[in-house]
Structure formats: C-alpha cells, structure tokens
Image: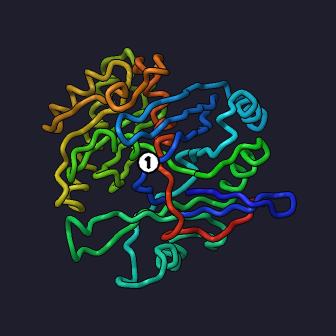
Amino acid sequence: MRAESRQVGSQPEMKFPSLRRSASASSASVAICLFPGRVDVASVQIRTDSLPQVLALESYERGSNDLEALKRLGARYKALSGPCSSLLASGDYQLLQMEIPGTGSDKPLRERLSEKLGEQLEQPLTNFTYDAIRIPTEAFSPGRAQSAYVVVAGNAVIAPRVQLFHHAKLKLTTIDIPELAQRNIAALSETKDRALAFLSFDQNDGLLTFTCNGELYMARRVEVGLKQLLTDDLDRRSNFFDRIGLEVQRSMDNFDRQYGFLPIARLLLGPQPGAQPLQGYLRDYLSIDVDVLDLCEVLDISLIPELKDSARQAQCLITLGAALRRDASPGEGALPEARAA
C-alpha cells in the first residue's frame, strides 16, 4: 500500500494506491521497519545491469518512544529526507484470497471486490484500509476464474503509523506487508515460469511463500521460529522439524491443487544459523531440492560486510525485502483518500 501525504489542517491526509509492482527499476529506496525491541533501516539500489546493492543497513534499539527513535534516525541519515517504506506486523492485517467478480468489467479491481469484501468483515468497510493485487494465472491457465489477494488493515492501525512518520518528518510513501517483502527476496532466486517455495524464519515464527515470475501466489504462516529451531534439546528440535515438514507438505499439496500448472522448482530456506540439519531433514521428508539462501549470492553486499553473517541475514531479511520493493504505479486497485485522524 502506498501512502501519499497532503496537509489537511493539522493532520496529513493519506492516499494508498495500488500494491502492484512497476516493471521498471527504481532508484535507491529506504525501508524503516519496527520490530519488538529494535528498528531496522535499509537502503537498496536496484540496478538493471547487476545485482541490487545494499547501500546501508543498521539496527537500533527501539526504546519506549517510537517518535523519538524515528526522529533520531532522521537526524542521522540525510537519505531519510526522501521517500521511505515501512511494514505492518503480521497481526495488524488480514491477507484474504478472493475470486474477482464481474469478468470483463471495466471497473477498477478495488471497486469490484469492495462489496464481496464488506460481507466478510465484522465492521463497516469504512473502518478499514484495503488494497488488492491480482494473482496472475491468465498466461498459464486461460479461462480460469481470476483471483486476487486483498490486504485489509483497520484504520486504527494505519492512522497511528502514518501519524508517527509524519510527526518524525519522514516521508512514508509505502506501507507493505511481510509476504510481499519476502516475495521481493524470492524474485531474486526464481526460475522462469516455475514456482519457488521460500520458507524463512524470524525469532517467533516462519513464513512460507510460493512465488513465480516475481508474483505472490500463496502464503502460509508456520508456528515455529528460530528460538525453537536453535534449541540444544535434540528431541524438541526433532519435533519442531516434524511440524515444519508436515506444514510445508500440506501447503505444497494445496498449492498443487490450486496451481497445478506451475511446477515447484525447489524449496528455498531463508538464511539462518545452522540451517543444514533442517535442510537435510526437509530434503528427505519432501523429496524435493532444498537449498539455503545466501544473500551474498543475490545482493551486492560489498558496502555491508556484516551481511556475510547468516544470523544478520536472517534478522534483516524482511527489511531488505521491503527496501527491494519497486515503485508501484497508481491505477488499478487505488484506494480512496483516508484521513489519519
């Protein structure tokens, strides 16, 4: 979701255009992401003739005052005077898959989905900010009913985030979600016209996405995080491996039922310390190629040598994905103006 700010009285008026990606490369982009206990800042230059280059990457203690933390960042980095993006936490939004009604309609995607979406929400649609992104299947399965992912967040979640960046004098232009940030990372390792299953972990849980040609087709949460995977208790770790294997297998079966025309090339594990035991387990369990992502192979990290460390890669993976987001063009799926009250 992109946010464009205009001053209305004492508060910024926000507009959130489409989640679609632009086909053209953008200049260096900045992501500022708030996590429990820390704030991550990443700047990435997307280049047409070489790997994307990480220009800056730092993490800071979040403290008890988010506004003061962001003000300190703004004072430290001149680059933050330009546009930046941020991420919602996984519990702050819903990601719904919906069939697109009105085949052949000229109405914008958002309008075509609004009535159907309103029927699924317990509160009036006016209490939410939402955006939609198509699941592109036309090229692989002509005539198939078209679907979209709809990201829905309460205005009570969006407005404080917009206000926070506004008062910190940071130009928040995009509010994104982890699934799409991970899509951006996955796009660097895909095989054309074949699906990539990508499983990453943060401290608390895992995120499994299925992408193809830079587009998101499916996403699932896995209730196992790095804290569990790094335990020294071998029996507990074995149980966690079993849970992960079962969830990945179920998700792959579900993906095959929905998108059987997209063969899965491999499973890619996100960077993590000591990934080899899980890699070997899943390779045997799933009977599929399983690789571990090394960001050094898909990003130019020459300016950020700390990214050679797999633990640092795991910590900042989603922030880097947010910074890899190409500018989306306004148009289909554009949201109406919503005041940050």
- Could you say where residue 311 lies in the image, as x and y percent from the top left? 44, 21
266 vs 238: above or below: below
63 left or right of 2 in image = right
Q: For this rendering, which residue is in front, 174 or 329?
A: 329
The extreme top residue here reads: 232
127 left or right of 178 in image = right
Identified at 29% across, 39% down, the residue is 189
Check the picture and name the quadrant holding the N terminus. Answer: bottom right
Q: Secondary structure at mark 1?
A: loop
Identified at 17% across, 59% down, the residue is 260
- Could you say where residue 292 lies in the image, as x and y percent from the top left? 28, 28
77 left or right of 223 in image = right
Check the picture and name the quadrant holding the C terminus. Answer: bottom right
Q: For this rendering, which residue is in front, 73 or 226?
A: 73
Q: Which scheme is used to colour this image of the protein? A: rainbow
The extreme front residue here reads: 49
Q: For this rendering, which residue is in front, 250 or 189?
A: 189
- Could you say where residue 224 lies in the image, as x and y percent from the top left? 40, 34
Identified at 46% across, 17% down, the residue is 305
- Could you say where residue 141 lies in the image, as x and y percent from the top left? 20, 69
- What residue did someone put label 1 on? 25
Q: Amino acid at mark 1?
A: Ala
Task: Count residues near mark 1 (Cα–Cα under 10 Å), then give few for <14, some for 14-19, many for 20+.
Answer: some
Residue 80: image quadrant is: top right
95 vs 102: above or below: above
193 vs 242: above or below: below
